[in-house]
Amino acid sequence: MGLANEETAMTPEVPARLHADPIGETVLNSDGGPDGLGGWQPNAAEVSFATRITGASSVAAKGEFDRPPGAVELGWTATLADLVLGRAVLAAVPRNRSGVTVNLRIDWFTAQLPPAPTISGTASVMNFADDFAVARGELFSADSSTLALLVGRFKLFGSDDLPPPPVIEDVRLPNALSLSNFLELEYGHVDALRTVAHLEAALVFANPAGVMHGGAQAAAFCTAAEHLAAQDGPGWRMLDIDVHYRAPVAVSPEVLQLSSTVVRRSRSLMRIDMTLAAPDATVLTQASATLAGPPR
């Protein structure tokens, strides 16, 4: 995202309602069995983040996130964002096809989560091209206020040989602790321009393929960006995050390194680039976040 027009970047126009239920009258009744959820079954990461699919059609999906009491950080909703986008895509492809997130973008229209106990999300497929699909969605509060717009790009592949979803043996229930504490993100280096944190790709954040859920990774990037921005002083707030998944992050007790660097800062905007790297320094995931500064 360019930073040339700071006024435009700081005061985005909320678009017309996207969540006027893209599933509409075609939504299936979730009481009628798993097909009502587009084939969705909960995995460890989605249970850990109190996130679930509540309905699906042939081209769309909707879900919910139960906000932990006192939680206000926007990153808590990243797993819901990835989930509804991905489930919309999977609802639109044949049962022998699956997909992985290659890019997730979230644009927020709020400084923090509202106090409502539940955040909702909807998404629908916008485009198929070759082996890729693009979905667009929205997060909104109980009063129907738009909280964020979502765009995800997914790589599709044959899934005949994929194993069934694993039995959930371990989860980490959300609580009122900070998102950073929930993820057990430990900072080894902090200064005004750069932080380095350590993150374990724990089983509690796994998806059915045995890798760290893309939404959990996005959540870690969100809280890391906010932590770095806070070194400049209070009042910085997330405007957007753009995550690019380069390689699977296998569930493992090995400690990953999440590095965040301020690459541009003005009085009103800050741009932070981040990487999640394996112990051998191989970059697995990249992200970039834009934050708006406090009034001066």
Image (cartoon, rainbow, N blue to C red):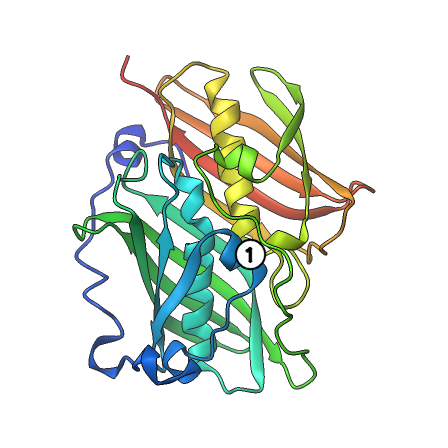
Q: In this view, does 292 lie above or below 18?
A: above
Residue in view at x 36 percent, y 81 percent: 36
Is residue 125 found left or right of 14 in the rendered image?
right
Observer-nearest of 125 and 226: 226
Q: Position of residue 183 (x, y in %)?
A: 58, 40
Q: Is mark 1 on a helix, strand or loop?
A: helix
Is residue 49 found left or right of 252 in the rendered image?
left
Q: Is residue 180 above or below residue 268?
A: below
Is residue 35 found left or right of 102 in the rendered image?
left
What is the crowding at mark 1: few (fewer than 14 residues within 10 Å), some, or many (at least 20)?
many
Residue in view at x 38 percent, y 24 percent: 236
Q: Position of residue 79 (x, y in %)?
A: 47, 53
Res 240 quadrant in image: top left
Q: Where is residue 249 in the image (x, y as percent from the top left)?
A: 69, 54
Observer-nearest of 182 and 280: 182
Farthest right residue? 280
Q: Position of residue 127 (x, y in %)?
A: 40, 73
Callout 1 amino acid: Ala
Quarter holding the N terminus?
top left
Residue 163 appears in the picture as rendered: yes
Q: In this view, does 253 lie above or below 47?
A: above
Residue under pointer 1: 45
Residue in view at x 58 percent, y 54 percent: 171
Q: How many labels does the image show?
A: 1
Residue 124 appears in the picture as rendered: no
Quarter holding the C terminus?
top left
Res 100 quadrant in image: bottom right
Res 9 quadrant in image: top left
